[in-house]
Amino acid sequence: MDIKTIKTKKSRLDEVDFDNLGFGDLFSDHMFIMDYENGEWKDPRIVPFENLSVSPAMMTLHYAQTIFEGLKAYYTKDKKICVFRPSAHASRMVVSAKRLCIPKVEPEMFLKALTELLKLDRGWVPKKRENSLYIRPFIFATDEYLGVSVSNTYKFMIITSPVSLYYKEGLNPVSLITSGKYVRACQGGTGHIKAGGNYAASLYPAKEAKKKGFTQVLWLDGKEHKYVEEVGTMNMMFLFDDELVTPPLGGTILAGITRDSVLTLAKEWGIKVNERRVTIDEIMNRADDGTLLEAFGTGTAAIIAPVGKITHNDRTVVIKDGKTGDLSHRLYEELSAMRHGEKEDKYEWCAML
Ligand code: COI
């Protein structure tokens, strides 16, 4: 399918202060949009970024039949653009779509749309090393109907946003608190996909965590409230002595692309990698006895986010004296170097534009 392009008459690029970027509050000149009607995706187009006009009865607004992805593009030292693992994101979106009865967008079309959009807005990819262009593909139901049912029409869109680091802590360690009351996901639910509703349900507990001075909630499993799952905006990793442990994907945890990249690098570096269930008690005890050397989160937005403090019930542990650990630092640097074309991309993770 050919993509029709209508370019903006007035670029906003020269109004952007690239030295003071936030996260997700500024949008590039163009967006991609495609409609699903009568059983097929049609009319792919790139148009100036603009508001949508939707019916108040649009189903997504009521029943959250919507999914999204998040990936990033980086400016390389050879003045090219590296889009990090776009095929993995396209495939994950197919998995998300299936669970919410949303018609899939073929990865080929996803990649074509992304490529065309980025070619047009390549000037929006920040040049500063810690910054990037965050890419947000999403699909949402557009039927105008108040019955709870599968929509017959959808839109697939991609918008992009020049961003800096996700957490206000920057590259410094974040603090996490478990929730004794709320859960993020349970078996059979939607915890493994990028469904908008997952994030809506996390807002209230996250607000409580923030009120207590923590960056995020460290989610425990929905059944026994005992095993560590993830953070919602990132997967979790723990370095116990020489063993890197991360909770296994099992239906309640998002299959993070950064998670997968980190596991690949750690294996290459000869680190013992173990995807196994880990209890919050093990983490607290091993922090106390000194065998928890590092904890960090991994995610597209979060990149590698060291964790300096965890609170569970009435107990608090400080990890690595609240400082960034060597492995977290090495992983961050290695990923950055690959993404900026400073190191060989041996796994072919960068799609170069
Ligand atoms: C991402 O890392 O892309 C995420 O999806 C987290 C987010 C909701 C900002």
Image (cartoon, rainbow, N blue to C red):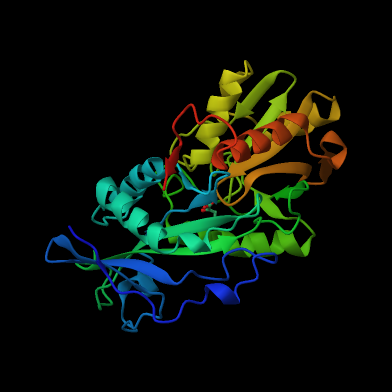
Residue at image coords 55%, 50%: 75
Judge whether residue 258 can be spotted in this image: yes
Residue at image coords 50%, 31%: 345
Q: Quadrant of the N terminus?
A: bottom left
Q: Residue furthest left?
A: 38
Residue at image coords 64%, 18%: 271
Compared with residue 284, is residue 303 higher up or lower down, i.e. above or below? Answer: below
Q: Residue furthest front?
A: 78
Judge whether residue 179 can be spotted in this image: no
- Residue 275 left/right relative to 179: left
Q: Nearer the viewer, residue 51 or 65?
A: 51
Compared with residue 6, is residue 248 higher up or lower down, i.e. above or below? Answer: above
- Residue 156 left/right relative to 132: left
Q: Position of residue 336 (x, y in %)?
A: 62, 40
Compared with residue 270, is residue 101 higher up or lower down, i.e. above or below? Answer: below
Number of numbered discs visible in the structure rendering: 0
- Residue 173 left/right relative to 17: right
Q: Quadrant of residue 348?
A: top left
Q: Position of residue 62 (x, y in %)?
A: 37, 73
Q: Position of residue 305 (x, y in %)?
A: 68, 44
Q: Nearer the viewer, residue 133 or 245?
A: 133
Q: Nearer the viewer, residue 108 or 99?
A: 108
